[in-house]
Amino acid sequence: MEIGRVIREYRKKKNMTQEEMANRLGVTGPAVNKWEKGNSQPDIMLLAPLARLLDISLDTLLSFEKDLSLEEINSIVYEINKKLGEESYEEVFQWAMKKIEQYPNCKQLIWQLALVLDAWRLRKEVPDAEDYEAYIISCYERALESQDENIRNRAADSLFGLYSRKEDYEKAEKYLTYFSNENPEKKRKQAFIYSKTNRIHEAYKAYEELLFSGYNMMSMVLQNIYILAMEDKDREKAHKLVDKQSNLAHIFEMGEYHEVSWRLDLLAAEKDVEGTIETMEKMFGSVDKISDFTKSSLYQHMTFKKLDEKFIENLRKSILSSFSDQETFSYMQNNESWKELRKRI
């Protein structure tokens, strides 16, 4: 907040007119009016008396807050965008520099103003656009010092994008250290760097890992929504979600077992005899191929642990055992195919 706005805000809080303030400070009413409009600044000798009169500290008067409020930041960002549409880039750039000097500790403001300036110079073909780059980079670098992880990530992302545009992939890559290893964007950006620096195998592997983890995440989310739908007794939605699970497994080439197994719970809930035995047979028949997705070209650069025969056999027994659950599949008691299937245990 500029000093004029601070003076106006705290003067009003004390129910003091501009004339009353002027009289107490030994200045004219128009002088106070100019301060509040930002047309002039109080004399340095008046700062301490002014702060005492308003019952605030000099830091508050001079706006030396550690951070601006989100509303204040948004207001400044709105203002710079408006100025860029009305004034020359150089004029707005100088205005932004003064704002940053005014709030040197507000890392979010510094990053956002740099981002706007950076984007504008690229979109609008600003003359001598490269001349502004060093300062914009320095602002991004300052934002990296923020205590807020979100701001650090955004600043790192901005620097990654800037150096990637310049095809300086070595510099771009170093900013990936600011991203959490759990952040999928880090791996995607790393894969991009690999692809641009002739590390093709590593690029494939990183993209494939993203693909595989993406499938698992989407599958888990669909399963959780399915559980909610069943608890909510929304069978129509449950059927749709099961279809989505099956299609998802097909698209990601996870194999027949993963395509059909999602249906069993819903079929049991609806006591669908024919559907249940058909699904059971497909599941049991595809157990040996449960890891066939490891042979898919989608994941050919990834390394998977090979499933041994003992694991497959135990899995087969576990599946058959679950099929024989009398409580869950009581509606299957008179089905001959189900009886035959149980005999395999």
Image (cartoon, helix red, strand yellow):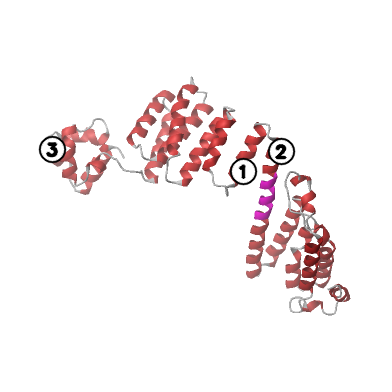
**Residue 213 covered by magenta stretch:** yes
Q: Nearer the viewer, mark 1 or mark 3?
A: 1
Q: Nearer the viewer, residue 242 or 60?
A: 60
Which tag, 2 or 1, sits closer to the chain's start?
1
Residue 273 percent location from the top left of the image: 82, 73
- Any part of residue 88 in sight: no
Which tag, 1 or 3, sits closer to the chain's start?
3
Q: Is residue 179 left or right of residue 323?
A: left
| Mark 1: amino acid | Lys
Residue 109 percent location from the top left of the image: 41, 39
Query: Pointers 3 and 2 in contact (CB under 8 A)?
Result: no
Element carrying mark 1:
helix
| Mark 3: amino acid | Leu
Q: Which residues are magenta?
A: 208-217
Element carrying mark 3:
helix
Residue 106 lies, with reference to residue 91, above or below; the image says below
Label 3: how many residues lie within 10 Å, few (<14), some (14-19) or many (20+)?
some
Element carrying mark 2:
helix
The quadrant the C terminus occupies is: bottom right
Name which quarter of the figure residue 249 lies in: bottom right
